[in-house]
């Protein structure tokens, strides 16, 4: 947020006198010549044009009642319909003392009635007092708005920092487990691609898809709690070691819950669910809760498949990379657990497009779809 964007806008400084008698306009202009910029109009129609043209520069209107073309009350009715008396103080200058004019004028939002012949020091004091009230309200409103903007910007920075830390943590975990760090970015890209380019994303807004893809980055944050000896073991894990490894899903959920700024972010509910359930399987044989079928959310299902696919076609400490064809065969035959048949159908339909992600990664050290 720049200093200019946060500055309080200039206060209104132009007073408009609407009266068909030149002498009356001259008298009123003389009263306020050292307090405001003065604009004049000879009738209500011209006054309406100038009020609309001046906009936020207008600090007050002195309005005569009896005028040709459009009288003061007719103009006032238009201004009231547009809500202008709520923003700009309007004073009715009149020689009439009838109750009907007074009642209607106040009902339309006039701040005060000034009766002719005017008494200069009385008119100035009454008008300036009201203008100062409006200016004070304007200053207060501007300051409140500025503070709201500043607070929003601070919240945005804090949220961005928090998310940046989580992303950095996710990438650091990949390095810790012997990965290049591109795994989390590929999971993000595959998840986004599946939701944007297949019917799986039907009914989701672009914003929601962005939040789910962002949440996918954090799927393995719980591995921070897994000992190096297990995380980087080159061979097959023992049954006991595997039970410890499985706890990374629960640890991930707990970690995300403990980041206050993360809980306030739109991505939190997706991130928490994905971290907790990306190892659940369609047949109920996954972990940690043994969820089955549609008990597993679609985002968690997509990240689960993306995670398996990327693990198969990438080199890991415990295996060499499989070919894309071999990876598809393993997935199709259930070698990594069962997946939603509809999810697999759409995945197989676009899988060749996903391969470009890995070709780009080989050339550039990263990839994006």
Image: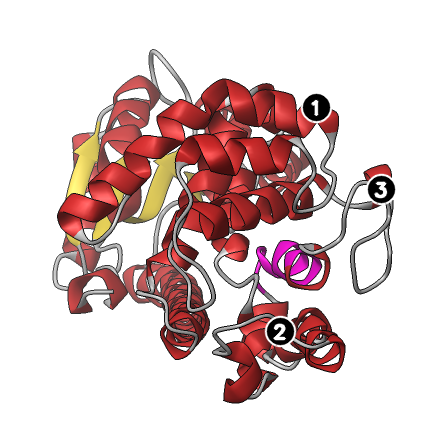
96 with respect to 41 (left or right):
right
**Which secondary structure, mark 2?**
helix
Image coordinates of residue 319 in percent, x first then y, are 45, 60
* Structural distance between the alpha carbons of marks 2 and 3: 27 Å
Give the number of marks.
3
Identity of the residue drawn at 24% across and 47% down: 361
The C terminus lies in quadrant: top left
Residue 271, magenta (yes or no): yes
The N terminus lies in quadrant: bottom left
Check the image and report above or below for 345 versus 369: above
Which disc number belongs to residue 342?
1
Nearest-to-viewer mark from 1 and 2: 1
Magenta stretch, residue numbers:
265-274
Q: Nearer the viewer, residue 249 or 85?
A: 249
Q: Residues within 10 Å of mark 2 (few under 14, many from 20)?
A: many
Provide the residue designation for mark 2: 256
Q: Earlier in the sequence, mark 1 or mark 2?
A: 2
Identity of the residue drawn at 70% across and 74% down: 242
Image coordinates of residue 24 in percent, x first then y, are 23, 39
Does the image show residue 205? no
Q: Earlier in the sequence, mark 1 or mark 3?
A: 3
275 with respect to 112 (left or right):
right
Q: Nearer the viewer, residue 155 or 182?
A: 182
Q: Classify residue 175 by image quadrant.
A: bottom left
């Amino acid at each position: 947020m720049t200093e200019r964007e946060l500055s309080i806008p200039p206060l209104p400084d132009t007073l408009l006198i609407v009266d068909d008698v030149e002498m009356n306009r001259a008298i009123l202009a003389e009263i306020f010549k050292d307090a405001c910029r003065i604009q004049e109009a000879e009738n209500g129609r011209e006054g309406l044009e100038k009020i609309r043209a001046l906009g936020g520069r207008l600090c007050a209107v002195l309005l005569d009642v009896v005028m040709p073309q459009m009288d003061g009350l007719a103009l006032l009715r238009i201004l009231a319909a547009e809500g202008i008396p709520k923003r700009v103080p309007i004073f009715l200058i009149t020689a009439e003392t009838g109750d009907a004019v007074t009642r209607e004028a106040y009902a339309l939002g006039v701040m005060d009635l000034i009766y002719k012949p005017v008494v200069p020091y009385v008119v100035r004091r009454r008008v300036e007092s009201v203008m100062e009230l409006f200016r004070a309200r304007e200053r207060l409103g501007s300051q409140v708005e500025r503070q709201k903007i500043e607070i929003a910007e601070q919240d945005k920075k804090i949220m961005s920092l928090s998310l940046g830390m989580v992303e950095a943590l996710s990438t650091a975990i990949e390095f810790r487990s012997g990965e290049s760090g591109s795994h989390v970015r590929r999971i993000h890209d595959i998840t986004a691609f599946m939701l944007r380019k297949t019917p799986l994303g039907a009914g989701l807004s672009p914003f929601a898809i962005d939040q789910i893809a962002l949440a996918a980055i954090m799927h393995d944050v719980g591995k921070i709690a897994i000992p190096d000896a297990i995380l980087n073991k080159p061979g097959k894990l023992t049954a006991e070691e595997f039970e410890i490894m499985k706890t990374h899903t629960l640890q991930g959920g707990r970690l995300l819950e403990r980041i206050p700024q993360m809980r306030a972010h739109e991505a939190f509910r997706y991130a928490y669910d994905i971290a907790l359930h990306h190892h659940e399987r369609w047949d109920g044989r996954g972990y940690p809760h043994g969820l089955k079928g549609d008990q597993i959310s679609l985002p968690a299902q997509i990240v689960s498949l993306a995670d398996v696919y990327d693990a198969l076609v990438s080199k890991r400490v415990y295996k060499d990379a499989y070919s894309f064809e071999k990876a598809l065969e393993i997935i199709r035959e259930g070698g990594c657990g069962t997946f939603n048949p509809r999810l697999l159908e759409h995945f197989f339909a676009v899988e060749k497009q996903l391969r470009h992600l890995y070709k780009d990664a080989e050339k550039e050290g990263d990839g994006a779809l």
